């Protein structure tokens, strides 16, 4: 365990380069680090093959979840910093031949044969450190952007940076729970208990 949370293969969940936030920002960073730590605990001391293994009827794997959470956190942090990216009109997607953006999203859930768990964890640590810096340095947590048009968002909704960081926390916590089930089915290990 490092001063910045549980470590996996000796790598801290975040790096000490992020400025020390205070107040509400400290609470956000602490919660992010806590839930990242739960997620990272699920991949402690496993092999690349185990990280790719499906242990439930779901397509989810431990490596795929690490990859997905890193990608999703990075996308939401970019939303906070720069606003919404060009959105896909999901109502017009030909699911037998989806556009590259949809394929990339689906692939963000899968650990490729050419990927290693160590590589995915390194990328996740970089994304986490960048998000922590953004939380600490963003001039105003009330900064808001319109959400992209998508069937799962209320039309015309806007999220503040604060709300978006809370969403990253919720997403990380949800996937840490998924990972805990997958790890327990893999070898009986679990985050708590």
Image (cartoon, rainbow, N blue to C red):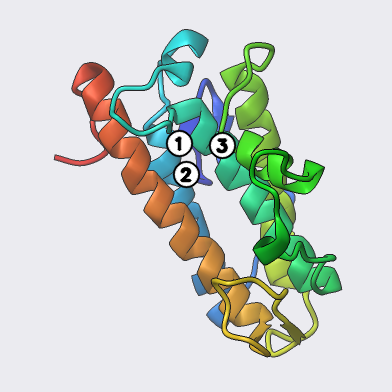
Viewer-closest of 127 and 7: 127
Residue 78 numbered mark, or none: none
Mark 3 or mark 2, which has the lower sequence index?
Answer: 2
Viewer-closest of 41 and 105: 105
Residue 40 numbered mark, or none: 1
Q: Residue at x 39, y 46 (%)?
A: 176
Query: Along the horizontal axis of the image, is 179 left or right of 138?
Result: left
Label 1 crowd bin: few (<14), some (14–19), many (20+), radius 10 Å: many
Q: Marks 3/2: CA distance?
A: 24 Å
Direction left: furthest residue: 193
Q: Name the residue under label 2.
A: 5
The quarter of the picture where the N terminus appears is top left
Viewer-closest of 174 and 121: 174
Q: Which residue is drawn at 75% across and 72% down?
A: 80
The quarter of the picture where the C terminus appears is top left
- Between disc 1 and disc 2, the foreground one is 1
């Amino acid at each position: 365990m490092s001063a910045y949370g549980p470590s996996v293969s000796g790598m801290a969940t975040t790096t000490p380069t992020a400025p020390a936030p205070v107040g509400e920002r400290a609470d956000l960073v602490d919660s992010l680090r806590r839930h990242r730590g739960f997620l990272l605990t699920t991949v402690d001391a496993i092999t690349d093959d185990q990280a790719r293994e499906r242990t439930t009827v779901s397509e989810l794997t431990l490596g795929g979840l690490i990859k997905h959470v890193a990608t999703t956190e990075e996308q939401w942090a970019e939303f906070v910093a720069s606003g919404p990216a060009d959105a896909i009109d999901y109502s017009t997607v030909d699911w037998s031949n989806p556009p590259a953006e949809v394929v990339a999203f689906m692939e963000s859930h899968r650990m490729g044969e050419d990927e290693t768990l160590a590589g995915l964890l390194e990328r996740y640590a970089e994304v986490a450190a960048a998000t922590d810096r953004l939380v600490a340095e963003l001039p105003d947590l009330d900064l808001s952007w319109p959400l992209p048009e998508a069937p799962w968002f209320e039309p015309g909704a806007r999220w503040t940076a604060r709300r978006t960081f809370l969403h990253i926390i919720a997403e990380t916590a949800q996937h840490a729970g998924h990972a805990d089930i997958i790890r327990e089915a893999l070898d009986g290990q679990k985050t708590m208990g």
